[in-house]
Image: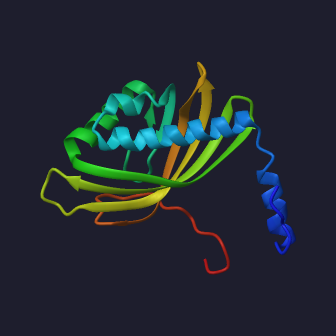
Amino acid sequence: PRSTQGVSSAASDVYKRQMTYSLNELSDRQEITDLLSAYCRAIDDNRPEDVVSLFSEDCYLDYGGELPIIQGRTAATKFFSIGTDRLYARSAHFVSNIEVSFPENDRAVATSYVNAWHEFHSHQPDAWIFGRYMDELARIDNGWLIEKRTFRSMGDHNWVGEMSYIERMGPHR
């Protein structure tokens, strides 16, 4: 093990706690990270059926703002087919800052940041949106699927329509 000499007590505690992951938990974390990356790749490749395959049959999706709540794979297929094919000529989605916890067996909660660029078919300017996915996942048939996804924006550039924004905390609020 690495030495924690010269590291603050709080930082040392975090370091020690992070080293207690089991191999199964490390594997689950990587599978969930891979799933989040697969979502980005499928969106950007205009493969709505592959996007939807990453969600449970009874999924609940809340992308905020003026967008409808989406419930179930059938509604999700319609939603993603419109966005990835009819609205966007190209897009590039990036996830980072992925945090995963396991509140109970075969259940996970993941929070990740998303940075997404969109080029529209129409002649409107390209748009960027920056935000956070909050996902609830379940292990189903030996694989992880997203059961509930909530997106909240942290900001945007040239985005069309209203968005729901993350509430900031702290003394400067």
- In percent of width and height, residue 167 lies at 57, 65
On-image quarter of the N terminus: bottom right
Label count reads 0
- Residue 74, relative to residue 96: is it above or below? above
- In percent of width and height, residue 101 lies at 69, 44
Describe residue 56's horizontal placement relative to residue 51 as left or right. Answer: right
- In percent of width and height, residue 3 lies at 83, 64
As drawn, the residue found furthest toward the bottom would be 172
- In percent of width and height, residue 81 lies at 28, 34
Describe residue 53's horizontal placement relative to residue 161 as left or right. Answer: right
Residue shown at 50% from the left, 37% from the top: 35
On-image quarter of the C terminus: bottom right
Describe residue 136's horizontal placement relative to residue 161 as left or right. Answer: right
Residue shown at 38% from the left, 60% from the top: 129
142 or 53, nearer to the observer: 142
How does the figure colour the protein chain or chains?
A: rainbow
Residue shown at 84% from the left, 61% from the top: 13
Describe residue 81's horizontal placement relative to residue 41 as left or right. Answer: left
